[in-house]
Image: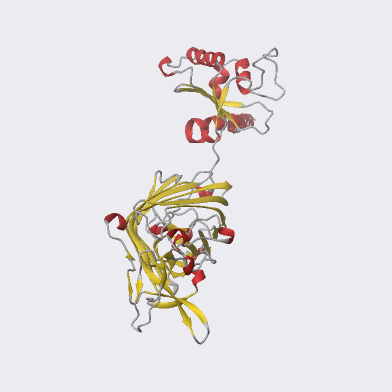
Amino acid sequence: MKRNILFLLVLAFVFGYYKSDAQTMIPDKRAIIDSLTTIDSEIKGYFPRWKVCERDLQFQIYRSFVNAQFPKENLDMNNVEILAAPRSFDDEPFEIITISCGKESMSAYDIDVQLTEILVGFLSGELVYNGQDRGVRSDIATRDYCFNEIPQEIPLTNSQTTAIIDYLQPSNVTHAFTLSMFEQAIKIGKTGFWLRSKIGIDDIGYHFWQAGQGSITLQRPLYVNTDERTTDKVPYLINAYLGGAYKISTGINRDLIPEQVTDAKDAGGTSGVVDWMQKRILNAEPKGKIVLGMDFHMPFHPEAGLAADFQFPVSKITTEQIDVTSFGFLANTNNVAFSPNSGTQEEIMAVAPILGTAGRISAFYHWWLDPKDPENYFRFDLGLSYNEVQEYGLYKQYDQSEKSSNYFITTNEVDGLKFYKPESFGDWMFAKVEYRNQAAYPFGASVQLANQVLMARIYLPLFGNWFYLEGKYSTVLRDKRPYEVGNFFMISPVLRLTI
């Protein structure tokens, strides 16, 4: 009998112990939130916060801190901030978690002990503060005192917390598609391959159709980055680019013929739907170019590396028949002369500038301000750029068999044609700084100097993370060459889709 009684007592004691322990283990919403906010201050950015500027409430809160024996030297009555839990409905009072006065803060427990229920009711919006109904419960739970809302941060998505090099060409997704007037790009699954189509040559400052050229390239990864520290940022140590460039005729005045060009103001031009765009005179190689490039990241420090992009004409042009309506040309103001070996004298009616070899090589460095939080990203490039432009004499020749006139461009036996290429240090220099903010609304900007042309670029989100607005502006810093556009600005919508 005694053994049974002893057993029951032990069982009751154990049951009571675990029951009381289980009760203490029941989670409390306020305790959890209070614990989180006191341990990790960064979480506060995602909660409702506001600063109290009502003088009477500031004083009452200050006196409550003083009465609670907080050090007066750490208190500031003019800097009172309230942190609250997110509300389920807009018409319910706030649940206050912490109140700060200067450098000191009260937790939820301290608030219940040190502050009166009326003061807490005023601060939370539960009670009316101003007017005849002061102290009465508010129907709409409004904070009717003076306060300044602190903007609430938006939690980042997985794609935004992953360090990537190019936001418009993300490497942290399986499929990606980007579409704008400047560039179109498709990521081909998990292969790391990218197919890109671009208009213009940004590397020499001639964006959009200033260069008269478009290109299509395939990017192929050649070497996987095995460095655990940087493999998420730089998945491949080497990327190779191979493709071709082609001539575009957009922006050329199709109604203007060489015989009508009398001075530099007549040259080039636009027509139709692009009438509002500035004139373009420069042409790309009519037979096309080969595009080659490579990005090489240092194995011992993948954030740094070398980048090279070059474009070479498929073949050299000496004399070629052309469709004059698809070429930009200048007036022959320098009296360029034509004296072929055949002895016939042809008149040079205009000069057609054609962009030949172009490219750049540079050292680059990727820098995330906080590797654990890749919100702020910089890229620095420093190196050399190169481009050459050859003037071609444009003349017309009558074809007896076809009873018609054809237009030709030539460099043979033509005196006075100019050949432009880098001459000074400024012509060779290439420098670029790029910044990206990868927060809830990612945006980016860059400034570049190449070919003594200053180019700036910026993109901003319009709707979510899929629809952007991108703008590019360039201006020539040296004496403008006859075929160059002094100041050129272009804006384009950007569609960015990822899976």
* Count of number-bearing discs: 0
Q: Residue at x 55, y 33 (%)?
A: 151
Q: Is residue 131 left or right of residue 395?
A: right
Q: Is residue 3 left or right of residue 200?
A: right
Q: Residue at x 70, y 14 (%)?
A: 133
Q: Position of residue 79 (x, y in %)?
A: 48, 21
Can you name the residue that lies furthest to the bottom here?
A: 401
Can you name the residue that lies furthest to the right here?
A: 139
Q: Position of residue 194 (x, y in %)?
A: 49, 64
Q: Position of residue 24 (x, y in %)?
A: 58, 30
Q: Quadrant of the N terminus?
A: top right
* Residue 220 visible in image: no
* Residue 108 in which image quadrant: top right
* Residue 118 in which image quadrant: top right
Q: Is residue 469 left or right of residue 134?
A: left
Q: Residue at x 52, y 56 (%)?
A: 277
Q: Residue at x 66, y 18 (%)?
A: 127
Q: Position of residue 440 (x, y in %)?
A: 53, 43
Closer to us: 448 or 422: 422
Q: Quadrant of the C terminus?
A: bottom right
Q: Is residue 447 above or below residue 316?
A: above
* Residue 176 visible in image: yes
Give the colour scheme shown: secondary structure
Closer to us: 340 or 310: 340
